[in-house]
Amino acid sequence: MKKLILLFASMMPLFFAAHAQQTEQGGCKKSGCGQAKQATCETIPVDEFAARIMCKGVVLVDVRSPKEFAEGHLEGATNVAWGNDFEKQWMAAGIKKRFTVAVYCRGGRRSKAAAKELVKMGYKVIDLDGGIMAWQKAGKPVVK
């Protein structure tokens, strides 16, 4: 299990770099993607979340367990599981504070807790209202 966690931690910067490159090429598909100047948290509905994660400077983070992540996640998401060692995993992921962090979990409870912690750490955060369950209910795609 330790080896699996270390493997995940070592691969997160690679996933982040690929996502950052993808969002820089894709640009912003919706007005209202403006970046907040200070650490904030905003819980938003599925359609708005879908538009905002396409914006340049937004990093998508799934805070569910690695097992849940493997069962299906939003395309381009980095997995940083919410739990006792969240801050350590977060630091290993290397996500800079200049990015807005878009977080989600299964139903919204863990992502709200993670969002609060990230705001304390100085990040700008958007949280998917209802989590991946709401995302799938709205007919949005997931990848495995």
Image (spheres, helix red, strand yellow):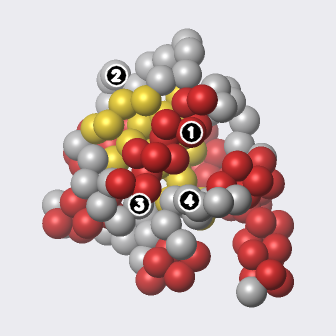
Q: How many marks?
A: 4
x then y, percent, for residue 52: 38, 38
Quadrant of the rendered image containing residue 105: bottom left
Sort mark 3 into few (<14), some (14-19) or many (20+) by Cα contacts within 10 Å.
many
Viewer-nearest of discs 2 and 3: 3
Question: In this figure, which residue is indicated by the disc labeled 3?
Answer: 105
> Distance of mark 2 from mark 1, alpha carbons?
24 Å
Q: Is residue 116 above or below residue 130?
A: above
Which three-letter amino acid code belongs to the residue tagged 2? Gly
Q: Is residue 58 above or below residue 87?
A: above
Measured along the vertical axis of the image, is residue 59 above or below residue 76? above
User: From mark 4 to mark 2, how far is it between C-alphas?
Assistant: 28 Å
Label 1 and label 3: CA atoms lie apart by 15 Å
Identify the residue position indicated by label 4 in the image.
82
Label 4: element kind: loop
Residue 131 in the image: above or below residue 51: below
Provide residue 127's location: percent of width, then percent of height: 39, 42
Residue that mark 2 sits on = 32
Q: Are marks 4 and 2 in contact (CB under 8 Å)?
A: no
| Cβ–Cβ under 8 Å for marks 3 and 4 | yes
